[in-house]
Amino acid sequence: MPFEYPEDLRYLDTHEYVRLEGEIATIGITDFAVDQLGDIVFLDLPDIGDAVSKEETFGTIESVKAVEDLNSPVTGTVIERNELLIESPEQLAEDPYGEGWLLKVRVNKSGEIDDALTASEYSIQVEG
């Protein structure tokens, strides 16, 4: 099954993605990361009002195989977190780019994502 990397997103080499709409960044993890993790059993996300910093860890995702840090592509304040995924983390695999988002962050500087990878750059990095 080929992996999907929507063109309207930017990507980190640690497999997070960001969709920037105005000053709101939606953060999640890629289709590739979900596949690599396998069955996701636990998600630890920051609370609303918490600050996140670019390239800093904001939470963890746990599967039957591993526990991985989640890294933020932006600096800002958490305005929403996906409570549905905290209750049922396995649903992340069904729609990582839609209903499977993790956080919404009000960003401090929108230009921060300029150095993130494009869909084609990320695809080359993970699939060779």
Image (cartoon, rainbow, N blue to C red):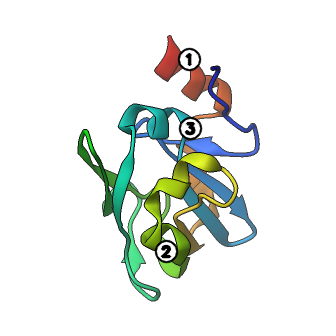
Q: Residue 20, percent across and down? A: 69, 60
Which residue is painted at 37% across and 76% down in the image?
46
Mark 2 secondary-structure assignment: strand
Q: In the depicted view, which residue is nearer to us: 109 or 53?
A: 53
Q: Is residue 74 visible?
A: yes
The image quarter containing residue 38 is top left
Instruction: Select label 3 or label 1 by which is in front.
Output: 3
Q: Residue 65, percent across and down? A: 25, 39
Disc 1 target residue: 124
Q: Could you tell me the amino acid type at mark 3?
A: Asp
Mark earlier in primary sequence (3, 1): 3
The image quarter containing residue 71 is bottom left
Mark 3 secondary-structure assignment: helix
Mark earlier in primary sequence (3, 2): 3
Disc 3 target residue: 31
Q: Is residue 108 visible?
A: no
* Mark 1 burial class by Cα count in 10 Å: few <14, some 14-19, many 20+: few
- Number of marks present in the image shown: 3
Q: Could you tell me the amino acid type at mark 1?
A: Ile
Side of 20 where 41 appears, left or right: left
Question: Residue 76 bears which disc, if any?
Answer: 2
The image quarter containing residue 66 is top left
Side of 99 where 69 appears, left or right: left
